Amino acid sequence: MAGIFSSANLAGKVPLEYERQVLIANIMAIILGFIVMGTLSVSYYMFGWLSALPYLMLVGLLCFSIPTITNRISHKAGRTLLCLIPIWFTIFLTLYSKLDSKTPLTYILYFDSRFVLMVAPILPGIIFRLEERVPLLLCLGSAALFLSFYDPIHELFGVGYYQQGFSEASYSYLNYVVCFAFTILLFGILMLRSIMERSERDLKAQYTQLQEKQKKIETQHEELLHHQEEMATSAEKLEDANQLISSQREELKKYNAALEALVEQKSFELLCANEELIKSNNELLQFSYTVSHNLRGPVARLLGLTRLMKVVEGMDEKKKMEELVLRSSEELDEILKDLSLIIDMRNDIHRVREKIALQEEWNKAVSLLGDNVKSVYQLSVDFSAAPYIYGIRSMVQSIFYNLLGNAIKYQSPERKLKIQVASFVYGDNDTVIEIRDNGLGIDLYRQKNNLFKLYKRFHAHVSGKGLGLYLVKTQLETMGGYITVDSEVDRGTTFRLLFKHPGDVARQVMYETDAIQLYYDANLNIIIIEWKREVTSEEYRETAHAFLSTLKTYQTRSWIADLRKQGNVSREDQLWFSLHIIPELVKYGLRKVAVLGGEAHDRSIYFKDDSASTIHFGCEIRVCESLNEAIAWLEGSNINIGEEVKM
């Protein structure tokens, strides 16, 4: 494998800041070239020589030439060509196939190329930086142009959908769906790229500052040592001042010890910063890979549904198909929102932990896999011994999804698939989840060192990218855990996931200013806001939006608001909160609100309005005298409502 990809290695002409993008582009170009040549070989074997095969061969050769172009001619030109090949060749091939009289004309020829153009922005979003505006706009603009003028271009060549005699009513609707999905995908990719580049710049600046501080401390240390040597020489020459010099020497030793302690502390901080930098860089790569990995499911379903529509005749069935297409598009939108949310909360994602019900997240993973989970499979799931863990919900669900998907994908064709899942307590409150199957298994003797590496696959007969186990390991390590595996070829595989029990989960601060502190109690699944002083209108509204954002993520039923130091809030802000914020809070699951300090006279009208508003939307508010009283009242509602609230 190393020999095949040796041409992807970078040459000295590539600037340092573009090395990662160019390396990814070279690897993807070689992979794309093999895919094209493989497709050409299969087509020739199955259908003989077709008129389109020379063009396919040309595309494959262009792909193989990309590393040479990027390394020796122009890295921007090579990457631009790589992004434009799928776009231009797709529009050329779809026109060619419709103009070629030997190619049977079907509905699918008007749909499949659209979806290729729809996902085309993923490639330039990965291999270009935002500062490279010209090639980025050229690639994204080409995809948008061909997708927007798909039908006019076909009509220009006389092969438009309606010009060919087709008259399906859903054709125009699918155009809107594809354009909508393309817009969401394009926006998500540009937003992800912007956030990743900003984070990378911040980390580099911090690293540079730490290096400068380290050099300054080392210089001071050298100067101090030199001064110590001079003092020792002076002590030998000035015997009459020996007592004074001895006293100064003792003081100097103490100062030197303090300085050495400071150097050691700063060195440790620098080491921690370096580790954080490496960890953050790996995160940025993981997000890029996750975009392409997680979006494949919805896009594949959209392609499958459009192919099914050509064989559906009844209007009811067509309407059902249209609803499924819309649902897949909405799922695509949700995936992009989730990825954006993870990046926005990157500073909190490693320290804020939720109390997660394992059975609930397993059920979500099964639901996401949909029809891939057959009724004939034997699934035995038992989380009773350890039903909960503290972790990051999106990562736990992703781990279950990948491991269950792999068990289904790599099942043995000679026996019925059996999957056994169980959890148990290990050591000091740690939790182990064991997932066992009777599938094809893995040859650990040969593949043990490659098992969790990126793009490593062990069964060539099943499609895949080799990202699943890499993501599982990375996500577990992010949460402080680890994974082990036992496997035997043609016998099955057992994965054991260890989740560390975090420290203090009762007061996890998620938002704090000099005016307020917002923290999350994972044990009780309650969000608590403590006001520290009298607040302005701007601070009040900013805090309300921060709380709403937190509730969307952690979906708790209960909220404690400690208003005893809040001061007066204007009537306008009170009405704004009642009319605009409370309905959104209830929408995302809030059911009970406990208020401390609400008995004050100047808040009585406010809470009368809030009570009426919350009762109208299905939420209850109560004024309590102490934090313990509020917790006692709310303890009956501290459960996760992920299944109840559909966002």
Image: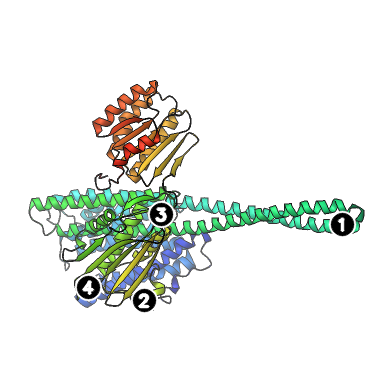
How far separated are the C-alphas under marks 2 and 4? Answer: 43 Å
Where disc 1 sits, the SS reads helix
> Is residue 148 something one can see in this rendering?
no
Q: In which quadrant of the rendered view does residue 6 lie?
A: bottom left
Dot 2 and dot 4 residues touching (CB under 8 Å): no
Query: Circle 2 is placed at which residue position?
Result: 444
Name the amino acid, label 3. Leu
Q: Which mark is residue 136?
A: 3
Side of 314 where 481 appears, left or right: right
Dot 2 and dot 3 residues touching (CB under 8 Å): no
In the rendered image, the residue lying farthest to the right is 240
Name the amino acid, label 4. Leu
Query: Circle 1 is placed at which residue position?
Result: 235
Side of 11 where 484 appears, left or right: left
Q: Which mark is residue 146?
A: none
Name the amino acid, label 2. Leu
- Asked if residue 114 is positioned above or below residue 466 in the image, the reply reads above
Identify the residue shown where x is 50% and y is 35%: 514
Residue 284 percent coordinates (x, y)? 43, 56
- For this rendering, which residue is in front, 398 or 160? 398
Sooner in the amino-acid sequence: mark 2 or mark 4: 4
Dot 3 and dot 4 residues touching (CB under 8 Å): no
Side of 570 where 494 appears, left or right: left
Q: Residues within 10 Å of mark 1 (few under 14, many from 20)?
A: some
Q: Of circles 3 and 1, which is in front?
A: 1
Where disc 2 sits, the SS reads helix
Q: Which mark is residue 50?
A: 4
> Is residue 389 something one can see in this rendering?
yes
Residue 611 percent coordinates (x, y)? 29, 28
How far separated are the C-alphas under marks 1 and 4? Answer: 96 Å
How far separated are the C-alphas under marks 3 and 1? Answer: 70 Å
